[in-house]
Image (spheres, grey):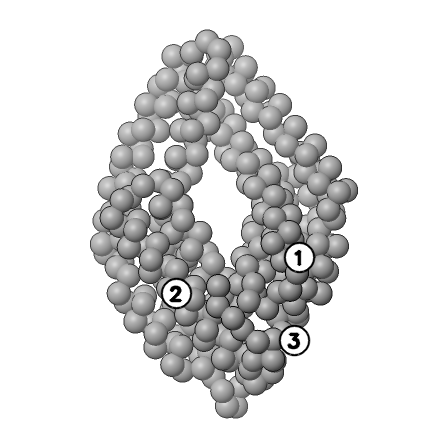
Amino acid sequence: MMRLEPTAPLWVAARALIAERKCDLEQRWNRAERTFDAEDIHDLRVSSRRLREALAFFSPCFPSKSLDRISSRTKHLTRMLGTMRNTDEAMIFFRSCATSGQRAPELDRLLSQLEQERKQELKLLKAGLQSHPLAPLREQLDALLLEPDLFANERVDPFTQIVAFAREMIVERMKGVAELLPLATDEKQVDALHRLRIAIKRLRYRYELLAPLAGSGHAELLAIVKAYQDLLGTMHDLDLFAEMVAKRLPETSDKTRLLAEIAGLRHALFADFSAMLRRSPLPDTGEQMRRSL
């Protein structure tokens, strides 16, 4: 991990940290193109999200038009990688259902459909990466890093200390989390829980970006936020799986049993989420993040 002084000017930190995210994206892109392994594709997707968070974080330091073009291109990459990842997760889950207890013919057919869909998604992904190669994005990022908006910048003082700006930006991400928490304490608020997951994910990526500034406790705070994200992510997956079962499986006792099983798993996860809120309240975690910088 690179070193960064808390007193470094904002624009200097912006160039250094975006360059670090760019390098990570290049490495993971090249690996994913070689293997098209499920985990390598997932790692590239996460890397694209981390780059997007870095671009959003330092957006006041660069010309808006250049930044918007890069952000749009990176967002397209994230979406392109997401479809196959979702199918992979569904296949893992339904295979576990098929191996636990009596196999249902309907479940076998669903798995067969997902396998065929994944093959088609892989073809589309390969074609997508060919039609949207890494080189133009790399060139755009290189050009962006050479044109920080240093003078007559009305959005931010690019010479302010990175640590002061970073603390403000952690508070900004925590506002989004705090707004959703009251609704997300209701198990039936599926959309609020989904949006809270996204808000927590963005908070995590922002705090990861600031690792070179963080003092003691950084790893522990990241672990807490990641635990929230993982738990809410699994709940969201279960919501998608339940929707898939409801739409694709015929009305049989096996379908009813499977939906009940998914509902039971989700209920247990929500209980874990509620316990985590009591044990490690999110507002306290956000404040600890701010203070650690």
The part of the image, by quadrant, that contains residue 28 is bottom left
Residue at mark 1? 217
In the rendered structure, the answer to whether residue 110 lies left or right of residue 193 reads left
Label 3 vs 1, first from the N-terminus? 3
In the rendered structure, the answer to whether residue 16 lies left or right of residue 5 reads left
Residue 66, given in percent of the width and then of the height, sits at: 39, 75
Helix, strand or loop under label 3: helix
The reply to whether discs 3 and 2 touch (Cβ–Cβ < 8 Å) is no
Farthest right residue in view: 278
Front tag of 3 and 1: 1
In the rendered structure, the answer to whether residue 133 lies left or right of residue 157 reads left
Helix, strand or loop under label 2: helix
Q: Amino acid at mark 1?
A: Gly
Front tag of 1 and 2: 1
Label 3 vs 2, first from the N-terminus? 2
**Alpha carbon of mark 3 to alpha carbon of mark 2: how far?**
24 Å
Res. 259 in view: yes
**Alpha carbon of mark 1 to alpha carbon of mark 2: how far?**
26 Å
Residue at mark 2? 22
Residues packed near mark 1 inside 10 Å, few (<14), some (14 to 19) or many (20 plus) = few
Residue at mark 3? 164
